[in-house]
Amino acid sequence: MRRKAFLPFAVGTTILALGIVSLLALILLRKPPAEAAPTDREKPIQVEAVAVQPKDVPVTITGWGEAKALNVVKIGPEVSGRVTEIHPNLLVGGIVPKGEALFVIERDPYVARSDEARAHVAQLEGTLARLKKEWENEKARVAAMVRSRDLAKAQFERLKELMTDEVGTQTNVDEAERNYVTAKDQTDQLEHDLALFPLRIGETESMLESAKAQFAVAELDLKRTRVEAPFDARVTDVSLKKDQVAQAGVAVVTIADDSLLELSVPLKSADARQWLRFDGTDSAPGGAWFSNLDRVDCLVRWTERPDVHCWKGRVERVESYDDQTRMLTVVVRVSGADAKAGAEGLPLVEGMFCQVEIPGKTMQQVYEIPAHALSSFENTIYAAVDNRLKTVPVEVARLDKNSVFVSGGLSPGQLVITTRLVNPLENSLLAIQSGESAQRP
């Protein structure tokens, strides 16, 4: 039993030992990368090379976006009614000049309401003037009545004193007292009525203000029956016919202002962080947002013919940041005048998909080499040193479509091989066909 249990353990140990021995043998047999040994009969590799020099290179950030009108407005009537007039250009693609009527709502009902409101204002103005006149008349009547009351009171008191001195009769005293009481009652009534005039006048003035406000609304509604283009408008959508009853607040026309176009251009966040030009001023004091961009001029090229159709734009602002795609979207604005200044008479219009070239920061003292000269997997290039091939690791500052800009690893005047080579041997002899300071073996 013990022998049977020990057998698998012995087999496993033997296999493990054999594996370790094989691995050590392979390590001892491994050779360094192949390197050409210099010999008298060595055949040189024909290559082209260029002597590189450092320089300052302005960066151009490229993105793509669709041109859109900045102002697109949906318009509906502010009053309800039957449509009596429509502009002849109120068609999709039609142009309606600023100030001209897009459409007109039937005016007659609103004219009648305006006239009624105006008449009500005139009526209340007349009532107010009459009350103020009556107030002045009542003041005079009260003054006369006060004088009569005072006279009646004096007559009553005089007769009453004479009666005490046994001069005069009781009948005269009673008559004088009656006249005084009557005058006093009439004076009190007039003073009471006079005190109500300011309240009546104030109430009428309030009614007049309300009537004037209603008249202003009626006039405004009358004006609103004519719906005008707020700018030179290009019609993009219409759902309106003549004699149709339009409802207030329901959009029936969509228009666009082509005097300003904007393109939303997504950029890689790495490009934006490293090369986009921010001016450092705070765009949102107290808030967390990007600082303002330098409003630099840029080029907008139509992707259908980028070499022919090009317009001038200007960087305007940062629009958004997408946390999913890590893209920063900037807005480029093109004025109507610049949009019309295209080649062959073709303007930049809404809907065109364009390539946008934005001037960025400047790379300081970098070396420009052809893109194919870089081994993108290892960030290395092949250099010619004493007519021998050497692999040089480099630091890449930026990659463009056709060029690579190297910020470290090269020195002024160094010969960089531009010929495409496939797995060349290190230290191979070179025959340089072109390039500064080329040496022949």
Image (cartoon, rainbow, N blue to C red):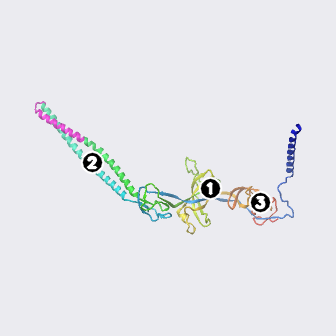
- Residue 167: within the magenta? yes
Segment colored magenta: 164-191
Q: Mark 1 points at which residue?
A: 267
Q: Name the residue under label 2.
A: 131
Q: Quadrant of the N terminus?
A: top right
Q: Given the image, on which type of amino acid does mark 1 rest?
A: Leu
Residue 434 pos. (x, y %): 76, 66
Q: Given the image, on which type of amino acid does mark 2 rest?
A: Leu
Residue 124: numbered disc: none
Residue 256 pos. (x, y %): 50, 60
Q: Secondary structure beneath disc 3?
A: strand
User: Upstream in the sequence, badge 1 or badge 2?
Assistant: 2
Q: Secondary structure beneath disc 2?
A: helix
Kindly tell me whether residue 294 is visible in this rendering. no
Q: Given the image, on which type of amino acid does mark 3 rest?
A: Ala
Q: Is the magenta stretch mostly helix, strand or loop?
A: helix
Q: Which residue lies furthest to the front in this view?
A: 1
> At x 25% / y 47%, what residue is drawn?
134
407 relative to 147 in the view: left or right: right
Pick the front one: 210 or 150? 210
Mark 3 or 2: in front is: 2
Q: Name the residue under label 3.
A: 383
Gap between marks 1 and 3 measured at Cα: 34 Å
Residue 281 pos. (x, y %): 57, 51
Residue 6 sits above or below residue 331 on the image? above
Q: Which residue lies furthest to the right in this view?
A: 3
